[in-house]
Amino acid sequence: MTKRLVVIGAGMASGRSLEHLFEMGGDWDVTLFGAEPRGNYNRIMLSPVLSGEKTYAEIVTHDDAWYAERRVTCRFGETVTRIDRSRKVVVSAGGETPYDKLLIATGSAPFIIPVEGRDLPGVISYRDLDDTYAMIDAAKNPAKAVVIGGGLLGLEAAAGLKARGMDVTVLHLMGHLMERQLDEAAGYLLRKELTERGIDVICRASTAALLGEERVEGVLLEDNTGLEADLVVMAVGIRPETRIATDAGLDVGRGITVDGRMVTSDPDILAVGECVELDGQLFGLVAPLYEQAKVVAATLCGEEAAFVPRQTSTKLKVTGVDLFSAGDFAEGEGREDIVFRDPARGVYKRLVLEKDRLIGAVMYGDTADGNWFFGLIRDGTDVSEMRDTLIFGPAYQGAAPADPMAAVAALPPEAEICGCNGVCKGRIVEAIEGGAATLEDIRARTKASSSCGTCSGLVEQVLAATLGDDFVMPAAKPMCGCTDLTHEDVRRLIKARELRSMPAVWQELGWQTPNGCHSCRPALNFYLLADWPLDYVDDPQSRFVNERNHANIQKDGTYSVMPRIWGGVTTPAELRAIADAAEKYDVPMVKVTGGQRIDLLGVPKEVLPRMWADLNAAGMVSGHAYTKGLRTVKTCVGTDFCRFGTQDSTGLGIRLERRLWGSWTPHKVKMGVSGCPRNCAEATCKDVGIVCVDSGFEIGVGGAAGMDVKAVEPLAKVATEDEVVEVVVAFVQLYRENGKYLDRPYKWIAKVGMDWIKARVVDDLAERQALVERFDVSQSVYQKDPWAERATPEVQRAWSPLADLTMEAAE
Amino acid sequence: MSWIDIGALDDIPVAGARLVKTHHGCVAVFRTAEDEVFATSDACPHRGGPLSEGIVHGRKVTCPLHNWVLSLETGEAQGADEGRIATYPARIEGGRVLLDVASLCRRDAA
C-alpha cells in the first residue's frame, strides 16, 4: 500500500534521507517542500562557489530527473505555514497536503545579532545559495566587506569575498579565531595566514550598530571604532529552525526534541538535521546529519535503528589553509599536552591526552595525519605504547618506513574512510570489486568523498591498494623518478630545512638515485641558486646544454648566437659588428626574431668563444636567448617618434632590461612595453606587459603566446616609471622564489592566484621592498655577461675536442 | 688492445663529457660523479644528438635533443626507447684517460 510522506525542507539531511528511503524500497508517495526555489544541493560546498572554484551546477546533489524518476512531487519555493496534526495535513500557499508520515527538516536559521541597522540592505547572512549569490554580486564592484563572526562559516565567507577582490575585515567577539575548534596558538597561525592574504582580523570586537541610510555604509563597534562597509555578512552562528514544530505543539527544546529513532513527540512525525535536539545536543556538521538520515529511512520502513552521536572533526575549506581539529582540547586536570612546532614551516600540532587516551587534536599547517589521530580519539585507543612518537603520526609507529599505501592497505574493512558520509573501507572495496575503477565511480556508488572531498586522497589510496597496478594514481605528481616528492614539496623543504647544496637535498630528502637525473637536476640547480644566491654554487653539469654552453643548440648540433639588443634599439656600429661576425665565421643564416633581435644560426661549438669575443669588443653582451631567465623586453617607439605615444616606452623597456638581465627564473620571461593602448609592442601577451597611458602605466602579468594564448591579467596601475620597475622586479622575484621549475608565469599565477601575488607585490610595500632587495642580492652574483667570462683561451680549449685522433693517425 | 692517452682526467668535468674526434666519427668520453670513465659513440641512435652535451647521472646520459636516456655501460637506450650506441674500453691510469684505439677502428665495437 502506498504511504504518503511529506517532507518539509529540501536540505542535505532530507535529501540524504530520501535517498536511503528509496534504496530500501517500499512504496512511498513523497511530497517535498523547500523554502528555496530549487532542489537539494551540497550546502557545505557553498564556500567554493563563493570563491569561484566551483559553480552551482557542480554542487547539485539531486536534479529534476532524480525527483521525476522517483515520482517525488516537488514544491520548491513554497513554505509550509502550519501542521494540522489532528487531521494529518500540512498547510501551504498551495492548499492542504495530507500525510501518513511527516518529516521535518527545516534546518537552521542564521543568528542575526539584535543591533540597530540589521535590516538595512547590504546586510546578509551566509546560509544558502541566494546569500552566496548576493555576496558574489556585491563583489562585482570591488568594495569593502565586513564579516561579523570568525568561526568556520565567517572565515570561509571572508576568504571567498577576498578571492573575489573585496577588501575584507573580519570581526570576532572572542580572543582568537574559531575558538570552538582551535586553541590559541592555532588561532594565531590562522590569523597570521589570513592577514598575510590581506584579510584584516579584529578580535574582541563587539558590534554596537550597523550604520547607513539607504543601505549599509558602516559598522560601529562598542569601543567606538568605525569601519566602512558596503557589505556586511553576519556569520555569528545558527539556531535550529523550530517555529513550525513549536506552533504544532511538538516538544521543542533548543531544537525539535527527537528520540534515537528520530521520532518527535508525535509518533507520525520525524525530524532530521540541524533542527533537531537529541539528549540536549544539537548537530551542525554533515557527518552526524547523514547518520541521522540513515536512521530516518530505517524508522520509516519500520526497521530498528538508533542514532548515536559521535565525535566529529573539522576542516576549514579555504584553499591553501591547512587546519584540522577534533575532540576536546581544553586544558584540564589530569590532561596532558604534546606539542610540536615548526615555526619556519608554520606548523603547529597539539595532542591532548587523558588517561593514556587521545581525546583531542589540533593541527595547523600540516594536517596529513589528522584522520589517523581522529581514529585514535574515536576508538579510544590506548596510546601509552607509542606516546613518545605519537605526534609524528602513523609513519613513526613501529619500524616500518613511511608508506601511506601500506598504512591504507593495512586498515581493517570497518575503518572509516569518509567521515561526512560514514563510508568505511569495506564498502569501498566492495564497490571496487563490483567494478568501480575511478574516484568518480566510488563517489557514484558509495558517496565516499562526495561531500567535503578531503578524503579523496584516502579513497584513491584504497583504489590503488585494491586494484594494484590497474589503478593510476592521479594525485600530485612527483618531481621525477628519483623521489616521491612534488616540486612544491621540494621547494618548501629546501627553504624550511635550509638545504644549500645538491647532495644535501639528495641526502635529506631521500633521493632514490645517487645523483638525480636530467629532469630533477636542472630544477634543483635553479631552486638552490634562487633560494641561496650567496651560498650555493651554480653547477653547469646540472644545466641543460643551452644554459651550459650559453647558446641554443640546433637540430644538427650547431648553435645560435644572439646578442642583447636593449629594448630592440641598436646602432649602425652594432649592426656592422654583427654583420662582420656573420661574414667572418661563415654564419649560414642571419634571422630577425620576433623579440626585436638578430639571431646568427648554425655556429659550431668551438667557434662560439671567438665570436663572443668579437661581439663583446663591439660592446655587446649575451642576449640569454637560451635561458630560463629574462629574454627580451620588446618595445615600441613611444613618445620619441610616435604621434600617439603617451610615455617613453622605449626608455622604460631598456631600463627594465638593464635591471633584470642575467636573472634566472623558473621558465623564460618575456616582457613588452607599449607606449599607448594601441599596444604595438604586443605587451598584453607577454609574461610581463606594460601599457603606457596618459595617467601612468598599466602593468599586466601572466600573458602567453605559445602553446597557450592568453592575455595578461592586470597586476597594478602605477604613476611613475620607478614604481613600474619596483613592481616588476618584485613580481619576478616572487616568481623566482615560488614558481615550479618550467612553469611560465601564467601557470604559476593560476596556482597561487592573482590576489596572493597582489597582496605581496602591490599592496604590502614592505614586502615589495624586501623582494626587490632579495632580487638585487641575487643580481650581485648572477648579473654577469657569460660571453665575457668565456671568451678566454681556457674556455676555447675546453670547448674543443679533448683529442683529435684523425690528426694523430695522419702523422 | 692498444691503449692511447687522450688527456688528463681533470680535463673532463665531473658528471660531464668531452669529445674525441676519430676517423670513424666522434667519440664521447664521460666522467661520472664517482670518477669512472666511459667512452661511447657521440651520436644518439634517435636523431644523432651530441651525447657529450647531455646531462650525466649515475652511469647514464640523457641526450640533449629529445631526452633519450642511454646506459654508458651497455650503450642500451633506457625505458621505452629502443636503440643502442657503440661503447669502447676506457680506463684511468695515473690521472690520465686511456682509450683502446683498436676497438675504435672496429665498427661493431663492443
Image (cartoon, helix red, strand yellow):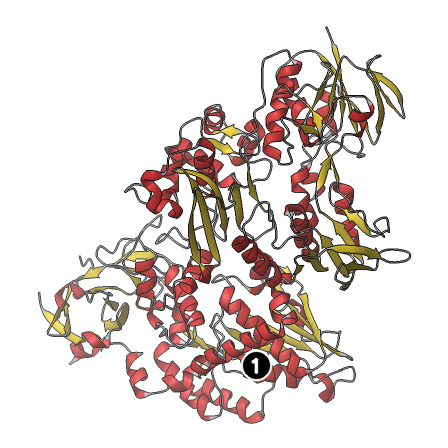
Question: Looking at the rendering, in which quadrant would you find the C terminus of chain A?
Answer: bottom left
**Numbered label tally:** 1
**Residue displayed at 20% across by 67% down:** B35
Q: Give, as a three-letter code, the residue at label 1.
A: Glu
Considering depth in this image, is A141 or A394 the residue closer to the camera?
A394
Q: Is residue A272 above or below residue A383?
A: above
The quarter of the displayed image where residue A756 is located: bottom right
> Most extreme residue toward the left, as rendered?
B1
Residue A402 in sight: no
What x and y, as percent, mark residue B50? 34, 66
Q: Is residue A706 above or below residue A675?
A: above
For this rendering, which residue is in front, A395 or A546?
Answer: A395
Q: Secondary structure at mark 1?
A: helix
Camera-side residue of A361 and A280: A280
Furthest toward the front, the residue is A333
Above or below: residue A97 compared with residue A42? above
Residue at the top extreme, as displayed = A1
Q: Is residue A647 left or right of residue B1?
A: right
Quadrant holding the N terminus of chain A: top right
Look at mark 1 in the image and give the residue it sits on. Answer: A657
The answer to whether A709 appears left or right of A603 in the picture is: right
Q: What x and y, as percent, mark residue A139?
A: 76, 56
Residue at point 60%, 50% (across, down):
A318
Judging from the image, mark 1 belongs to the subunit labelled A
Q: Residues within 10 Å of mark 1 (few under 14, many from 20)?
A: many
Residue A230 at x, y percent in the picture? 81, 58
Image side of residue A336 versus residue A236, left or right: left
Name which quarter of the figure residue A387 lies in: top left
Residue A598 is situated, as x and y percent measured from the top left of the image, at 54, 80
Query: Which residue is at a point 43% across and 90% down the rendered structure image?
Result: A614
Looking at the image, residue A114 lies above or below residue A666: above
Residue A507: in sight, yes or no? yes
